[in-house]
Amino acid sequence: MTDPVRAAREQLIRVGLTGNYQANDVPDLIVRSWRRSISSAAESAAPQRFREVDTDTLLGRAAVPVLDRWQHQLADTGTTLFLSDRGGSIVDRRASDSSERRRLDNLHAAEGFDYSEDSIGTNALGTSMVEKRPVFVKGSQHYSDALAANACAAAPIYTPAGLVVGSIALGGPVEAANPIMLSLAREISQQIAERLRASARPQDLALAMSFMRFTSSQRPTIVLDHESVLANTPGLPYVSVASHVMLWEVLNSHNWQSSATLRRELEGTHLEITARRVADGNRGHFVVHFAEIATSGPRQELAPQLQAQRLDSEPALMTPRDAVAVVDGPVGSGRSTAVDELRAEWGRTRPLETFVPSAEGIPWNSVESLLEAGSDVLLRRIESLADDELLSLREVVSRHGARRSVSPAAGVLFLTTHASGSSASMSSYIEELGVQRKTAALSDTPERIPGLVTRILNDLDPHSRHSISPAALQSLVQWNWPGNVSELVQTLTQLLGSVSASLIERKHLPKHLQQAPPRRHLSLIESAERDAIIRAMEAAGGNKSEAAELLGIGRTTLYRRLRQLGLDAGEGSI
């Protein structure tokens, strides 16, 4: 016998999103979800995406006692409880018996598997979060054929600020479907939300109050503190882990005593922020409004601008007939990356040949031959050239400039240098040539670090097997990076090779990064206190209660000082 619901779904897949389609006896909510599933190319088989999950979160701590109680009450009903995080991954499952657990394991309906609507299509856990309402999905209403034997009712879970943080579901075989499952899911969701409200920190409530006060307008707005960020709908494209950490550094570097409002263009973007600080006792948070600066060039996407800041302090001033381009900055500050950006901006697609000064010298004849053949050439670290090599460089540049003036098809010579660390003759020559791009030490531009981390991880891990937690990213921002970008690349490379978990957390970082002091200037007393706390924590093997006893202070006081002095190893995220 033909299943009319499955036939309706297959018809929608055949006609596509723009085709003429009308489903009878299928709820509008399900049809909307099917359309989104087709649009996102969701899997029609059992879930395959898996990641390790962390149950020690605010959501997990609030939900576990509620799940324990309901698991006992539903013990003989054949019903399974599922808890998902806001990304759609199942983080807790409470099955009624071993046979049901085996059945669910075969469907990959277990901890760690991704049940977001984008991944697996229409299902109660994921769809309830997209629709932001309780939903009941039965049998063939599921987008995935693998789930067609199930019925599941789910409801989203909300934070005190009204944000969806996860979902709770009751599921079982389709023949056991009962409308009361939807009421139970709604009730369990409300109980978890109530526990979230009861456990909310005062600063979370203050953040929520500011969010409700300042985000009613249509302009992009976010409200943030060190651990949390809330955004209205227009502000969502500006929110990511990288942008949160970068903005936090920018806002904390401003002198709020001299000016109550910060208005600043974000370097390398077409964005301007207007920010104000909202005092909350000894703590505070910020309200940030975004505006796009009108430019004559093409409009760029906004989120990547916040996630990956450009390395330069001023735009490149190049024309198609330039023969030489100079990038100036400290060693390891990303000068080669800046060259790549310049080539991309200038539309250079020819090969790039790289030479570095050595004891054998630079093969100048080869450099000229490559340039004449149309290849671009990069000479790195020319600040180390000897005077006789500098003379050869001058001659090559002079001949190449004359050649390119009549033959634009010739290549471009790119030079990286550190003018302030060069000899007087080299500095003079660099000034004569002119500098197209400047790079800065990471210690002077910490706001670049989140974007650089995103870019480096994308290069090292193109399949996105790893991500970095907000707390770990904050520790990377706090470190001074004496080796600049080179040290950052080396650190991330080592982490990817040594951390098996998909999420790189602060606990995975080398100890010197975990204990990196805040970038704000510490007083002598604060520095001494910080050193004493580090020694006590090491002596206590990381046990905070024992460390507090060794220091002669209360545990609550220790928690507060750990956070204030940048030693809190907690992830601090829902």
Image: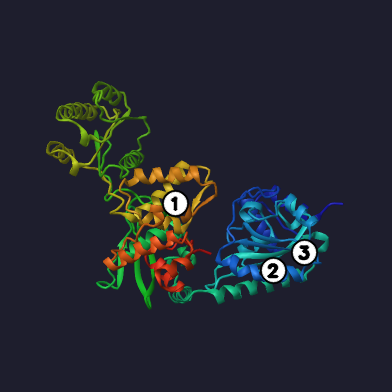
User: Image check: 123 left or right of 474?
Assistant: right
Q: Which residue is mark 3?
A: 79
Among the two numbered marks 3 and 1 on one chain, the one whose residue lies closer to the N terminus:
3
Residue 319 lies in quadrant: top left
Q: Nearer the viewer, residue 172 or 340?
A: 172
Disc 2 on helix, strand or loop? helix
Q: Which residue is mark 2?
A: 68
User: Contact (CB < 8 A) between labels 2 and 1?
Assistant: no
User: Image check: 71 left or right of 480?
Assistant: right
- Distance between the Cα atoms at labels 3 and 1? 41 Å
- Distance between the Cα atoms at labels 2 and 3? 14 Å
Given the image, on which type of amino acid does mark 3 rest?
Answer: Thr
Disc 1 on helix, strand or loop? loop
Is residue 223 in view? no
- How crowded pointer 1 is (Cα within 10 Å; few <14, some 14-19, many 20+) is rated as many
Q: Which residue is mark 1?
A: 509
x 36%, y 45%: residue: 487
Residue 70 lies in quadrant: bottom right
Say if 217 sits above or below 23 in the image.
Answer: below
Q: Nearer the viewer, mark 3 or mark 1?
A: 1
Given the image, on which type of amino acid does mark 2 rest?
Answer: Asp
- How crowded pointer 3 is (Cα within 10 Å; few <14, some 14-19, many 20+) is rated as many
Where does residue 268 sit, x and y in percent of width and height? 33, 52
Q: Nearer the viewer, mark 2 or mark 3?
A: 2
Where does residue 101 sit, x and y in percent of width and height? 75, 56
Where does residue 73 sit, x and y in percent of width and height? 76, 71
Q: Nearer the viewer, residue 77 or 377?
A: 77
